[in-house]
Image (cartoon, helix red, strand yellow):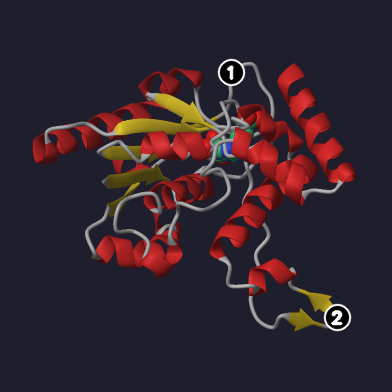
Amino acid sequence: MRIQALSVIPEVFAPYMDASILGRAQKADVFSFEAFDLREWTHDKHRTVDDAPFGGGPGMLMRPEPLFESVQAIQAKNIEAHTAPAHVIFFTPAAPRFDQQKAQELAQKEALLFVCGRYEGMDERAFSLADECLSLGDFVLTGGELAAMAVSDAVVRLLPGALGNEEGASDESFSVAGLLEYEQYTRPADFLGQKVPEILLSGDHKKVAAWRLANAIKRTAKLRPDLLHALQLTEEMRALMNSELTEAEKNQVERALNDAEKN
Ligand code: SAM
């Protein structure tokens, strides 16, 4: 996979993208990353990319011309070098929220081009360049660079060869739709009187797996009941809820499942 990012501060990417798992994945050719400086596509002495909004109001907006020129130039190069243009994603809070399902979808693409906004955002006409727009969440960042790195990270770890065996992405929050991950513990088994659940020390893999699934359901109902609408509750899950959860916990899960269904 090729990942590209367009930004007015392209220097912010390297420390994160070249470090740790992402750095290793780049070296192993799992993906490549390239950051472009939007100012390369300006034509004035001050390399201006922004201007005041029509109609007044605070702050500055990114002008459409450098955005059009840059995206078109990067895509022309992509076609020349790789035959396929990149899937273009603009970051803005005014867009559907990025989630694990979207990460899985994007992990199937050959190339992604992330366009990072700054200032008060972009001239609306620039969004016509986007194949899609994404938000990282219901808050406002000063720029799209963190969003680009967060999405890159979530996508790359799904690519074959990005994670070592010991770091697998298959048994995590959202790997079963509608479920958070179960609670996890490491040594010591007793930390300041807080004990690891006995079953996890038993060495009985079947029982551990059952406990984990029941724990994931209970935990999701408690922490993120809104997610449960996506959960396909199997017979096995129902049986585990009956055997592993207390009456109060079962009631909480049932309530959360009903609420999720209603919403
Ligand atoms: N005025 C815009 C609004 O109210 O929607 C916010 C602009 S924000 C200060 C500047 C840039 O940061 C945006 O163009 C976008 O690229 C990025 N950004 C801010 N919040 C974001 C979020 N939640 N998700 C993704 N990108 C975000």
Residue placed farthest to the right in the image?
248
Residue drawn 32% across and 31% down?
87
Q: Amino acid at mark 2?
A: Gly
Residue 186 visible here: yes
* 255 relative to 72 in the view: left or right: right
Q: Nearer the viewer, residue 11 or 165?
A: 165
Quarter of the picture containing the C terminus is top right
**Distance of label 1 from label 2 (alpha carbons):** 63 Å
**Residue 46 visible in the picture:** no
Query: What residue sits right under mark 2 in the picture?
Result: 193
Q: Position of residue 61 (x, y in %)?
A: 54, 30
Position of residue 224 relative to residue 199, above or below, is above
| Residues at marks 1 and 2 touching, judged by CB atoms closer than 8 Å | no
Q: Which residue is labeled 1 in the image?
A: 54
- Which residue is drawn at the image coordinates 56% and 43% (left, top)? 174
Residue 105 in the image: state x and y as whole percent: 39, 34
Type of amino acid under label 1: Phe
